Image: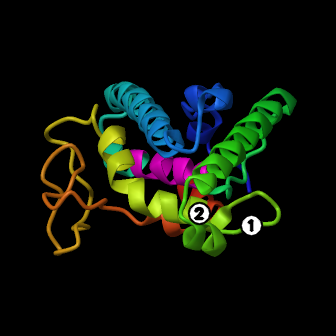
């Protein structure tokens, strides 16, 4: 699949430069959440700036900030879960490999801090820890969405009723219930990208 322009410049530099030797099993999960939330916040701020410029030049555009945020949110989820399809040019590919290696090391340390029963449940001979990564994302996606939408405006709302109760987002693309108003992160990345290009 051909990555959309937005994905080419996803703000995940701080994730690429995580110093995994500073992580131990007791603080790995907390530090990872901090780093992912920082990446989401910077990405959201970046998208807000580009969206505002786009709206100035294309006043009749139906582009919605909340949808753009949801797309990048889903891409961050794919990166965390080890499902990202984007390889990029050789330089970007090397950075992506470093990021994936860092995440594997961090999830190895998170795995090491779990109870014996949980370690057995998440045992992964290949060292990818896909199920642990999936569950980590499921447990932390609300916080990541909250960070992603920090820069959204009070009047930014999702284009349809998406909150669990069938309500509209209140402001800043957020549900009153603090649920994430999108399930884009559970749609395969290549399908999201096809839809984005359409």
Q: Is residue 44 magenta?
A: no
Q: Look at the image and tell me whether residue 86 can be seen.
A: yes
Identify the main secondary structure in magenta. helix
Tell me which residue sits at (51%, 68%) in the image.
186
Which region is colored magenta?
A: 69-80
Looking at the picture, how far across and down is residue 29, in whole percent?
49, 46
Asked which secondary structure carries label 1, the reply is loop
Q: Look at the image and tell me whether residue 62 can be seen.
A: no
Residue under label 2: 132
- Would you call the spot at circle 1 few (<14 residues within 10 Å), some (14-19), or many (20 or more)? some
Q: Which residue of the protein is positioned furthest toward the front in this rendering?
A: 116
Looking at the picture, how far across and down is residue 96, in whole percent?
74, 38
Q: Nearer the viewer, residue 74 or 20?
A: 20
Q: Is residue 187 left or right of 69 when viewed as pictured?
A: right
The correct choice, above or below, for 156 with respect to 190 in the image is above
- Disc assigned to residue 35: none
Q: Is residue 79 magenta?
A: yes
Q: Nearer the viewer, residue 6 or 17?
A: 17
Looking at the picture, how far across and down is residue 120, in whole percent?
65, 73
Q: Which residue of the protein is positioned furthest toward the right in this rendering?
A: 90
Q: Earlier in the sequence, mark 2 or mark 1?
A: 1
Q: Nearer the viewer, residue 145 or 5?
A: 145
Quadrant housing the N terminus: bottom right
Tell me which residue sits at (63%, 43%) in the image.
106
Give the total of numbered labels. Answer: 2
C-alpha separation, residue under disc 2 versus residue under disc 1: 9 Å
Q: Nearer the viewer, residue 52 or 89?
A: 89
Residue under label 1: 124
Tell me which residue sits at (21%, 50%) in the image.
157
Asked which secondary structure carries label 2, the reply is helix
User: Dots 2 and 1: beta carbons under 8 Å?
Assistant: yes
């Amino acid at each position: 699949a051909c990555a959309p322009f937005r994905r080419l410049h996803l703000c995940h530099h701080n994730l690429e430069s995580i110093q995994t030797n500073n992580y131990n099993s007791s603080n790995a999960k907390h530090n990872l959440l901090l780093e992912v939330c920082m990446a989401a916040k910077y990405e959201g701020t970046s998208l807000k700036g580009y969206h505002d410029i786009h709206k100035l030049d294309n006043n009749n555009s139906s582009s919605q900030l909340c949808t753009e945020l949801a797309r990048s949110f889903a891409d961050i989820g794919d990166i965390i879960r080890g499902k990202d399809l984007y390889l990029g040019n050789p330089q970007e590919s090397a950075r992506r490999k470093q990021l994936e290696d860092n995440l594997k090391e961090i999830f190895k340390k998170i795995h090491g801090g779990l109870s014996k029963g949980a370690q057995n449940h998440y045992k992964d001979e290949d060292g990818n820890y896909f199920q642990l990564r999936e569950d980590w994302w499921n447990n932390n996606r609300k916080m990541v969405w909250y960070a992603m939408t920090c820069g959204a405006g009070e009047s930014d709302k999702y284009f349809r009723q998406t909150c669990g109760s069938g309500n509209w987002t209140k402001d800043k693309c957020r549900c009153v219930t603090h649920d994430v108003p999108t399930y884009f992160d559970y749609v395969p990345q290549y399908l999201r990208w096809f839809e984005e290009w359409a």
